[in-house]
Image: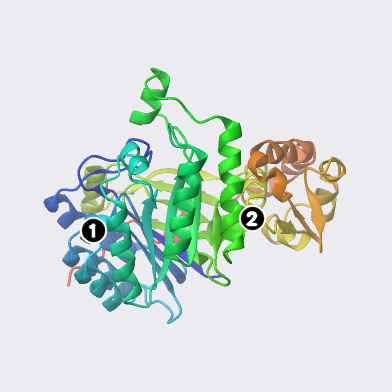
Amino acid sequence: MSYGCYVHIPFCNGEKCPYCGFYSIPYAPYLADDYIPAVLEQARRSSFPDFDTLYIGGGTPSSLTLMQLETLLDGLQKIHPMPKDCEITVELNPENVTEELVNTLERCSVTRVSLGVQSLVQRQLMVLGRKHTVDMITQAFELLRSKSFSTSIDLIFGVPGQELEEWSTTIGRAIELDPDHISIYCLSYEEGTPFAYALRKGLISSVTAEAEQAMFFTALNRFEAAGYEHYEISNLCKPGKYSRHNMKYWTGEGYMGLGAGAHSYAPGPPRWLRMAAVKNVRGFLGRIASAESIWEFVEALDLPKRVAEFLMLRFRLVNGFSVEDVARNLPEIDAIQFVDLLKPLEDSKHIVREGGRLRIPRESLFISDAIILAAVEATDRYIRQTALRLHAVTDDIDMADYITSFHGPEEPSPQK
């Protein structure tokens, strides 16, 4: 099993978007100049398995200078040589896309670009606090099409004041752009963001759940009619153009996170670990410089947590999961017995079984959270009994040794 690698670029040009809950700070050249070598040093010290997907996200990776971006991409490929078919994705904002940038990405073997479009209606872009215009999006696509990149766009629905007609306009214009991959997200009000504050104070109003559901299914119907395959609740693609990197998250494969605030996941057996680096650029730089551990927390996922995550992530996939998937990802449990515990949800039509796979039916995808919770509750007693029985067996594994085996010792590399 090959891993994925995610690199977090915690910089944005100017103020961050009012709905964004990801960790980022305003771009500062001197900080970025220090940050890129620190990320490469973290990669150099890490002994995680080979990876076949690399995702540069943020923040705004395109806030970096061309030299900084090239240093990062070239450096990573020298430290951890990648296979020829490695999927290398970089997130870009439309206003940053230039001929020089796309040439740099091509030279650095980038295969996929994810463009933060969000809307193709100017009024909605202004509400979302985006810095680009609809014309900039079109111009960015023209430049990207001059190369061989696979293209992906993000779109947001449920924006305050948004009408179904405006969302339909965005859908139609997105189809005209003809990207290879489309992600559609319902706006969420993340705690600590200006949007969450404005909602709490009554300065803006959220779109009704009924309107959000209508927008969701309108998008699915129109994109599918245009030839896109719906493969995950929020994601559609042209045949074969799904995100290989994101599939690793949804199917429980391992991934390494590089940079401030980045998460890593090391699947077992014997231990399933989740780690997160310190969520502060200066703190991250300081820990790299002093050879301290960069991890803000390391969590060993117990069986109940892993089962809940398995159900949450696999039920997001349109084709769900099989008994074999359960056995592979949750080897401690009886996969057949586990699936049988979900029979009441089959009887109530909340999930369906086809071709040996369990999935949420299309008409219920918008209420998937409630169905997933019901699935967790249906299996909870069996899972907790199994976890108690296994506790004595798993308790004798040395956590420090296991972390070291995945990441390598937290020591500075030799100076050359």
At horizontal 28% and vertical 51% (from top left) the residue drawn is: 133
Q: Residues within 10 Å of mark 1 (few under 14, many from 20)?
A: some
The answer to whether residue 244 is above or below residue 361 is below
Give the structural element (helix, strand or loop) at label 1. helix
At horizontal 70% and vertical 62% (from top left) the residue drawn is: 328
From the top left corner, tell me how far across and down residue 189 is, in percent: 44, 32
With 16 as the anchor, is 295 left or right in this view?
right
The first of marks 2 and 1 along the sequence is: 1
The answer to whether residue 383 is above or below residue 320 is above
- The nearer-to-camera label among 2 and 1 is 1
Farthest left residue in view = 30
From the top left corner, tell me how far across and down residue 64 is, in percent: 21, 58
The tag on residue 96 is: 1
Farthest bottom residue in view = 84
With 326 as the anchor, is 253 left or right in this view?
left
At horizontal 81% and vertical 64% (from top left) the residue drawn is: 355
**Residue carrying label 2:** 317
Give the structural element (helix, strand or loop) at label 2. loop
Q: Amino acid at mark 1?
A: Asn
292 or 97, nearer to the observer: 97
138 or 273, nearer to the observer: 138
